[in-house]
Image: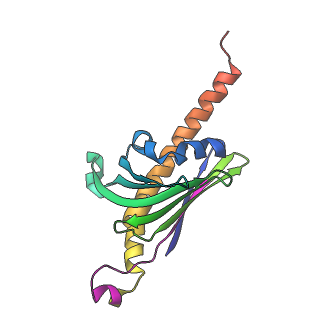
Amino acid sequence: MHSTIGIDVNAPAELVFRLARDVERWPVLLPHYARADVIERHADGALTATFVARRPLPGPLRPLGLGLPVAWRSRTWNEPETLRLRFHHVGGVTRGMDVTWRIEATSAGCRVSIDHDFRRTLPIPVLGGLLGDALLPAFVDRFFTRPIAGRTLATFKALAESLDTSASAASAHPST
């Protein structure tokens, strides 16, 4: 299964990349992220980390502000020359998922798109084989990937636009 979620950001692509590439700081920057614990630092600069994010509860429970914790382990790296972030999920129900963040300059700032590629059968003998390899990815995409990625994109948009506006205001009105 392939899915893409994206958002337009009124801030420079390089600023968004600098904010997003530091996955160790995500729990500080993103209120729905509880943890990003580095397990291993690889010689090529990649990290393997365990992430825990909170997926908002649905419907009438949403105003309570509680979230369902969702955990996964990824090998992650960034590609500064193309403004890409890459994640290969190596643990959790999303094991095998490949994720690519594309941050591309536009006339108004940038477009941030997250591509998810995931194919996996249910890890239940016989039943998983009968249902095929599309059911689990569709469920994960609808109920976990999209809600968490959507909040992540919205938060990075707000952060980048706020920082860019503050920097623009400071340069327009330097203190004397």
Residue 26's x, y, as percent? 44, 45
Outermost residue toward the top in this view: 176
Relative to 152, does residue 160 appear above or below in the rendering? above
Identify the residue at horizontal 27%, vertical 82% (top origin).
124
State the count of labels: 0
Residue 85's x, y, as percent? 56, 55
Q: Using residue 99 as the reference point, say whether residue 40 is left or right of it.
A: left
The stretch drawn in magenta includes residue 119: yes
Residues in magenta, as a range: 112-129
Q: Nearer the viewer, residue 153 or 24?
A: 24
Identify the residue at horizontal 57%, vertical 53% (top origin).
78
Q: Nearer the viewer, residue 167 or 83?
A: 83
Q: Is residue 57 visible?
A: no
The stretch drawn in magenta includes residue 78: no
Q: Using residue 73 as the reference point, say whether residue 62 is left or right of it.
A: left
Q: Is residue 68 visible?
A: yes
